[in-house]
Image (cartoon, helix red, strand yellow):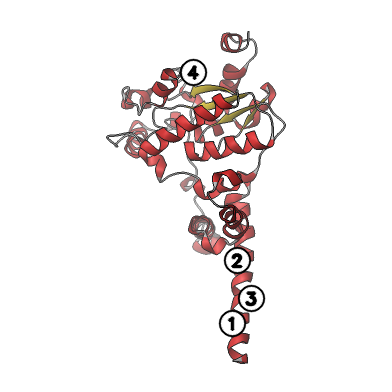
Amino acid sequence: MKKFLYQTFFFCCILLTINFILYFIGERLYTGNYKEYSLNFNSYLLSGSHGNALNDNTEEFGVYNFSDHSDSYIDMKRKLKFLIKHTHIDTVYITVEDHTLSPYREYKNNLDRSKFYKIPSDYNYLFQYYIDKYVNNYLTLLSPKTGKVIKKYYFTKLKNSTFFGKVNDSINIKKDFSKLSKEKKNERLLARYNEQYTFTEKSILLKQTLLEIIAICKKNNIVLIGVKFPLSKEYLELINGKSYGADKIFKKEGLLILDYKNEYISKTNYFLDEDHLNEKGGREFTKLLFAKDSSTYNLLFP
């Protein structure tokens, strides 16, 4: 019996040590940046990867960029409720792209990371909150997504090491969309379109979540403004007006939408790829979206 207990204890120590190592690696590579936030603003931008291009340029205009790659409306709702609980906010800018109600966002999201922002009222039972906050958050061995990120990172590092010969840096560098050949552009365009727009119906879950976000903002007297980010001319032509209708929900609710998707169709050098601005484009769009002397700003805040 003593031998069994000793072996069990030793085994648990090994698992905890492995988990401890993976936790800190995961924090650095995957979950750490997602947990960064500020409560020192009254206005926030909630978006997926389109918002990421604006970086922290928004802070110059008193808006905190709370966007992250792959955020769905469920992730944004968690962040919104977290902000309401911990600070005062009066304005929220939120993405209402043509694809944000696409069912692909039901499986490509940040639900494993945004649980960090869930508050006790999000749970039916309080013990579930503490399990998420302390058990699921720290037991990296139970997080398959974190494990995949760590595995991919170190596999890439190993693959690009000199052990396998001279590294060709061009392999892993994503070229600006404007610099690609027509054939490569079409490959990217079709791949993105097939990911986002091949579903016949919108996501009922995401539609309901967006309606809940609108209701939460109305209840808390928060001005909610929809934003449609600029898209490349080629991607706009491929989409050809197809939409899952997030903007229609806003219009039905009488909410303002700032539609800039056609804004930079002649500025190919502003795009990193078919539907994301690069650093230069993000910087210029931030000025357009939030500048106090713009007609948009005067319309919202006369």
Mark 4 / mark 3, whichever is N-terminal:
3
Between the C-alphas of marks 1 and 4, the distance is: 59 Å
Secondary structure state at the residue bearing disc 1: helix
Secondary structure state at the residue bearing disc 4: loop
Q: Is residue 40 left or right of residue 267?
A: right
Which residue is the extreme one toward the left?
A: 200
**Mark 2 neighbour class, 10 Å CA radius: few under 14, some 14 to 19, many 20 or more:** some
Mark 1 / mark 4, whichever is N-terminal:
1
Q: Return the residue at label 1.
A: 8
Q: Return the residue at label 3.
A: 13
Q: Return the residue at label 4.
A: 255
Mark 3 / mark 1, whichever is N-terminal:
1
Q: Is residue 255 left or right of residue 91?
A: left
The picture places residue 223, in percent across and down from the top left corner, at 58, 21
Point 58% across, 44% down: residue: 121
Q: Nearer the viewer, mark 4 or mark 3?
A: 4
Q: Is residue 253 left or right of residue 193?
A: right
Asked if the residue at tag 1 contacts the one at tag 2, i.e. Cβ–Cβ closer than 8 Å, the answer is no
Tell me which amino acid carries mark 2. Asn
